[in-house]
Image: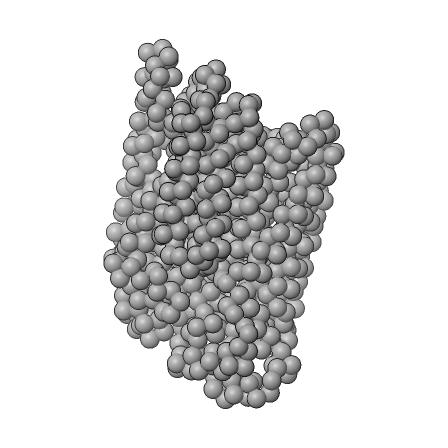
Amino acid sequence: MKTTDYFGTTDYIFMGLYVLVLIFLGFYLKRLASRSLDNYICGGKNIPWWAMGISGMASFLDLAGTAVIVSFLFLMGPKGLFIEFRGGAVLILPFMMLWTGKWHRRSGCLTGAQWNIYRFGDCWGGRASQLMGVIATVLTTIGMLAYLIIGAGVFLSTFLPYSPEACSLTLLVMATLYTMMSGFYGVIFTDLFQVAIILVAVIYISFKAFTGVADVGEISQIAMKVTGSPDWINGSPQWNVHVPQGYEVYKHLLIFASFYLIRTIVAGLGTGADPRYFGAKNDRECAKLSMLWTLLMTVRWPMMIGIAVMGLYLVNDLLPEQAKLKEAAALIHKAHPETDKPQWGTLISSIANAPDKQDPALVGSLQSLLGKDKWAEKMNLLSYEGTVNPEKILSAVLMMSVAEGMRGVLVIALIAAALSTFGSWVNLATGQFVNDFYKDWVRPQAKTRELIFASWGSVVGIVVLSYLFSLTLDSINDIWGWMMMGFGAGFLVPAFLRLYWWRFNGAGSAIGTLIGIAAAIAQRLLWPDLNEIWQFVFVLAVGFLSSVIVALLTEPTDPDVLRKMYLETRPFGVWGHLKDTLSPEERAKTSREHRQDLIALPFALLWQTTLFLAPMLFIIHNWEGFAVSAAICVGSFAAIWFLWFRHQPKDNFYH
């Protein structure tokens, strides 16, 4: 199969221009980023709030996540949104918008790890917590990049006659080079460029999907035939939903959605240590960039449901007899019994793209079973279980349902999304590694030039480890689920307690994080098939017990350090004895701010959920569901505005 079957001259011209612009931006921004470590990590706090809000949207709109969410929307319809309460619906944004973003900004720190010194003091507990913060961020980044690498490989190998590993490796080299050179400036300004491309893709896909649907009844019939779901068009969470083999764990949707929401609330309460908030000029900018970030995230959902709808029609035309897929998978398993799930994508790619290099008998049997017409495209949709691989719907739609020229633009848009997320994660990990480990622990006397070189070295090291880790994983959903519900739970408790409990100390934070991460890794090695809910319960329980016990058995934080942190940050929670030291006027002002923040939270969660749900229901012509969701969305936003945003001062609350 030749790449020209999928890409024409116009596609390659667009791709070439895209790469040239990235290279130009990388070299141009290198000079700005290299002036100081502050510039490299958070742009010297000179970047406009709207640019950081746009960049935040781009950093959350990744290729692998898009493929995962499209797969659930393809299987379940708009209800797939509720599976992504575990992370893809980014319901941590309301917490960052309302209070955790401004709390971190008020510290004046550069990174989340440095914030631990600010919170616990420059003592062994604070230093250990700072170091564990670096380790947790680097390990999280390695896991997230591995997830991105798998997604990029699966996506690109559908179009190109190369293995997923070769495709992702090529993309990694390009992304690594420009991220190394330009630091946070590169993250922000390449995101602005890439968001423009993403918006073109969103408009095109949404319009094509919307106009390609006759009515909601037609979608229902095709969805029933293709996925077996009897209620595909419904946008409300249900107790039971129909799912295929390999996805049975998500059958009880309402239980999972509720549990994922709890997980998101726990995670959201400890968020806010993002370079964008450390780079904001005041509290109001934290609110505005978060609100813009949330609004822009909306564009992702009509595009993804549009791809899912187009996927339904495509599979219905291409594979009207899906039972043959199970027979095809059985033939491949018999011919390659040594192939397990992590290697399945590479094997399928090689059979589809280079059939002349495979066993002729196997290829002949597969072609006889599936038909020679569009045989490679059918093969690329074949899952390990012998069903339609929902994680391939995204690439299949772009490959077969989009015209030349626009296909190149859409592929670039999704690659841009992958690179934006890549750059954000790498910048976050690199900033903490250099600022909070190399500069503090290894070379305190290092000059700016040396620190920039150390940043480059850390980028390369993190990327290499991420690539090696990606080779051991089963699927995009596999690693995403574990990162959100297993590994991520390892440091949720310390991240939460440091903001809301005065008695929590550096020792509890450091050792609690260490034990929590160890528990998550042990679960992955010893019980890899553990249900996501039990992953979360196990790791969170271990992290909670270890954090609290260690904190109570060791000395509390220095009162002077704690008082300074409280007076500058003003968190709510168990801080009573410190709040009592404020004047009556300041105490009333602080209580009023806390009350406004908390009252707005349920409205913010509801606003964001319906903000994502309403356009999906519009795309599939579910007018009744759209009207209800849109009304709730408008009402929730009005409540946020009157109860919270209009009270935000143009400067800072506290000086």
Task: Report how many numbered discs are placed on residues in the image.
Answer: 0
- Residue at the image point whose x is 51% and y is 84% from the top: 366
In the rendered image, residue 646, in percent from the top left (x then y), is placed at 35, 28
- Residue at the image point whose x is 27% and y is 69% from the top: 230
Q: In the rendered view, would you say 104 is above or below 521?
A: above
Q: In the rendered view, would you say 544 is above or below 367?
A: above
In the rendered image, residue 119, in percent from the top left (x then y), is placed at 49, 25
Q: In the rendered view, would you say 618 is above or below 442?
A: below
- Residue at the image point whose x is 29% and y is 63% from the top: 241
Q: Quadrant of the rendered structure where residue 189 is?
A: top right
- Tell whether 364 sits left or right of 449: left
Q: Quadrant of the rendered structure where residue 312 is?
A: bottom left
> Which corner quadrant holds the N terminus?
bottom right
Q: Quadrant of the rendered structure where residue 554 is?
A: top left
Q: What colour scheme governs how the chains and residues are painted in the rendered image of this protein? A: one colour
Report the residue that reaches farthest toward the front.
553
Q: In the rendered view, would you say 608 is above or below 287?
A: below
In the rendered image, residue 644, in percent from the top left (x then y), is placed at 34, 30
Taking depth in this image into account, of 580 and 526 the one nearest to the observer is: 526
Taking depth in this image into account, of 440 and 582 the one nearest to the observer is: 440
- Tell whether 342 sits left or right of 70: right
Residue 558 seen in render? yes
Residue 233 seen in render? no
Taking depth in this image into account, of 63 and 453 the one nearest to the observer is: 453
- Residue at the image point whose x is 55% and y is 23% from the top: 123
